[in-house]
Amino acid sequence: MAFDYEQLGYIQTNQLRNALERVGERIDEQETFKMIAEADPENTGTIQFAQFKELILEKRENEQGSSDEDLLDAFVAMGGRADG
């Protein structure tokens, strides 16, 4: 709900940095653009939960590791639906 105002199941790519910061991930502008390119290769301008999850998993695995449940909790905390 925090970012997916219309409850369509995705966020806009330009909201990615704010969404990541809201779930505790600090990234710089360059890393943001890299993550958007990875999550949205078709350049649709949107990121769905599965894409968001992949971004967080990759980032956290590189840092410390994470579980699917933690990622879903983070997604819900930023306004996503519990069913992903």
Image (cartoon, rainbow, N blue to C red):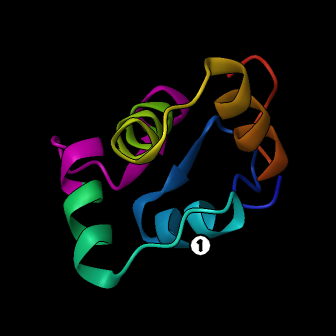
Res 67 quadrant in image: top right
| Residue 77 horizontal side relative to residue 59, left or right | right
Q: Farthest residue in the front direction?
A: 64
Q: Residue at x 65, y 32 (%)?
A: 71
Vertical order, 39 against 83 (above or below): below
| Residue 83 horizontal side relative to residue 44, left or right | right
Which three-letter amino acid code belongs to the residue tagged 1? Answer: Asn
Residue range (magenta): 37-51
Mark 1 lies on residue: 18
Q: Is residue 40 visible?
A: no
Q: Farthest residue in the bottom direction?
A: 29
Res 36 quadrant in image: bottom left
Vertical order, 40 against 17 (above or below): above
| Residue 22 horizontal side relative to residue 36, left or right | right
Q: Nearer the viewer, residue 29 or 26?
A: 26
The x, y position of residue 46, in whole percent, is: 41, 49
| Residue 83 horizontal side relative to residue 56, left or right | right
Q: How many marks?
A: 1
Indicate the secondary structure of the residue bearing disc 1.
Answer: helix
Q: Residue at x 67, y 22 (%)?
A: 84
Q: Nearer the viewer, residue 48 or 77?
A: 77
Q: Residue at x 48, y 63 (%)?
A: 16
The x, y position of residue 65, in whole percent, is: 49, 32
Q: Residue at x 71, y 30 (%)?
A: 70
Res 19 quadrant in image: bottom right
The x, y position of residue 39, in whole percent, is: 29, 43
The x, y position of residue 75, in whole percent, is: 70, 40
Q: Is residue 13 magenta?
A: no
Vertical order, 14 against 36 (above or below): below
Q: Is residue 35 visible?
A: yes
Q: Nearer the viewer, residue 9 or 35?
A: 35
